[in-house]
């Protein structure tokens, strides 16, 4: 990895309630454009009297159980604050969030999404608070790796992502894109679990020679067709180039990010017969089922992919391969949920305390107890020999190397649709990696031109 491996110690949040910066008036004060900041900040929430915070999120199922425990823990710590939670689907929240945050009676705290489509739009419009003062108050910047922190930054004019001010906090849960493997199938094929990319490629050939399917995919949906593309790019591409391109640092083309190289590798695998039959007619879950049914050796997916599938966690593992040359651990990864504060809230200090609690060390420990990857190092350890144990140790290795890469589709509002569609066409023999690079670059350039 070409950039220094800077690791910030992720200390527990232990800030006295009496800590105050620049006074104690709670109301947010707008300055101009996207630079909406509280006039003063305080961690003394207990002295504010009864407060109700409206909280909007898209957590469902087990995720909702985790959030409910978080709310209960926060309300126990701050008995004067009540969290009034509204839960909707991801699509419902994302499609209405701008209007809701523009409403003075809207949510005080909301789950927002990374990238230009959500956080960039909200920050530029002045709909969410610039959190720099609270970040200083609570020490948030020192509690996350620099590559994770960069995902939450925008310049107040909304023109640049990955630098400037903090507009969201990452909670305590992490999601990564990585490679799962079937222990029994590899053992039967006489293949050791790969520890390098070269060994992984050799394993594919050996598994194929034994009459088994090397890789399980389902590419019917554009969104999830990018899973293997992003995972391979994180290994074969240059991390600095990927970061600079996605964040618009300038001087980097899409070709230099290794996305075309990754697409060419997928095309090569398809031609070599490494993919499961009928992959282009299977949706995301269908491709996953091929893997969990024991019909393929490897599967690219998000962390936590096997939860709820009924698969025996001890039968599978997850790889965290290093870069072929530099040896660093890199992975596409981001917070599972990012939280922002409405610029119209009447209770910014209480809202910031809630964000602080959501990212606290106890919440990271609860994440592991609940089966999620933590963003910080934790003392709670998952059961040894399980796929979850592999996920946790792999994420810890990436954190140690400060190797998190942004999801590439953050680079422009249409990028996911463009490159996801191209992956489908490439694997169907109807397009080329060169076309993917050209179309992706055009999407990027068009979006940059609109931002000015």
Image (cartoon, helix red, strand yellow):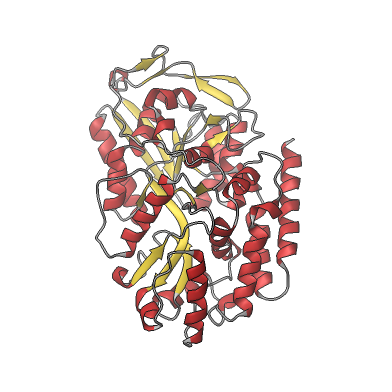
Image side of residue 198 versus residue 390, left or right? right
Q: Where is residue 190 shown, x and y percent of the image? A: 39, 81
Q: Which residue is most to the top?
A: 23
Q: Viewer-proximal residue, 335 or 243?
A: 243
Residue 96 position within the rendered picture, expressed as x and y whole percent measured from the top left = 55, 44
One can see residue 216 in this view: no
Above or below residue 242? Residue 266 is: below
Quadrant in which residue 439 is drawn: bottom right
Question: Is residue 15 rendered to the left or right of residue 260?
Answer: left
Residue 68 position in % (x across, y down):
31, 45
* Location of residue 7 by image quarter: top left
Q: Residue 287 location, x and y as percent?
A: 49, 73
Can residue 237 be seen from the camera position used here? yes
Residue at image location 68% in from the left, 70% down from the top = 426
* Among the 4 quarters of the image, the one containing residue 384: bottom left
The answer to whether 36 is drawn above or below residue 231 in the figure is: above
Instruction: Tell whether 312 sits left or right of 150.
Output: left
Number of marks? 0
Residue at the far bottom: name it: 211
Of 292 and 55, nearer the camera is 292
Residue at figure coordinates x 39%, y 55% from the top left: 394
Quadrant (top left, top right, bottom left, bottom right) of the C terminus: top right
């Amino acid at each position: 990895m070409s950039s220094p491996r800077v690791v910030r110690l992720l200390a527990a949040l232990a800030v006295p309630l009496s800590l105050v910066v620049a006074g104690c008036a709670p109301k947010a004060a707008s300055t101009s454009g996207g630079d909406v900041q509280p006039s003063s900040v305080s961690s003394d929430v207990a002295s504010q009297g009864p407060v109700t915070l409206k909280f909007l999120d898209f957590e469902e199922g087990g995720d909702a159980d985790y959030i409910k425990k978080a709310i209960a823990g926060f309300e126990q710590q701050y008995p004067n604050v009540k969290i009034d939670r509204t839960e909707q689907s991801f699509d419902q929240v994302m499609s209405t969030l701008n209007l809701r945050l523009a409403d003075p009676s809207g949510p005080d705290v909301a789950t927002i999404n990374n990238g230009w489509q959500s956080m960039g739009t909200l920050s530029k419009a002045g709909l969410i608070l610039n959190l720099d003062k609270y970040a200083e108050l609570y020490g948030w910047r020192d509690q996350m790796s620099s590559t994770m922190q960069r995902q939450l930054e925008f310049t107040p004019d909304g023109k640049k992502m990955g630098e400037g001010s903090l507009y969201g906090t990452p909670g305590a849960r992490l999601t990564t894109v990585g490679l799962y493997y079937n222990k029994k199938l590899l053992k039967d094929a006489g293949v050791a679990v790969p520890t390098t990319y070269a060994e992984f490629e050799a394993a594919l050939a050996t598994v194929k020679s034994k009459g088994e399917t090397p890789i399980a995919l389902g590419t019917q949906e554009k969104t999830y067709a990018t899973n293997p593309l992003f995972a391979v790019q994180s290994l074969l591409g240059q991390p600095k180039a990927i970061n600079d391109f996605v964040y618009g640092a300038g001087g980097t083309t899409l070709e230099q990010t290794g996305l075309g190289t990754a697409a060419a590798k997928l095309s090569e695998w398809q031609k070599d017969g490494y993919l499961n039959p009928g992959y282009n007619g299977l949706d995301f879950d269908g491709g996953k089922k091929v893997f969990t049914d024991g019909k393929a050796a490897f599967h690219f997916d998000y962390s936590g992919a096997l939860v709820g599938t009924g698969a025996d966690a001890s039968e599978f593992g997850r790889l965290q391969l290093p870069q072929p040359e530099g040896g660093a651990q890199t992975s596409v990864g981001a917070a599972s949920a990012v939280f922002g504060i409405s610029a119209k809230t009447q209770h910014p200090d209480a809202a910031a305390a809630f964000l602080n609690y959501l990212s606290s060390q106890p919440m990271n420990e609860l994440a592991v107890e609940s089966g999620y990857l933590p963003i910080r190092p934790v003392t709670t350890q998952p059961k040894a020999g399980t796929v979850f144990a592999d996920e946790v140790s792999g994420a810890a290795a990436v954190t140690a190397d400060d190797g998190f890469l942004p999801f590439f589709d953050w680079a422009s509002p249409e990028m996911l649709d463009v490159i996801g569609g191209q992956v489908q066409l490439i694997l169907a023999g109807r397009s080329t990696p060169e076309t993917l690079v050209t179309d992706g670059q055009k999407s990027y350039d068009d979006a940059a031109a609109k931002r000015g």
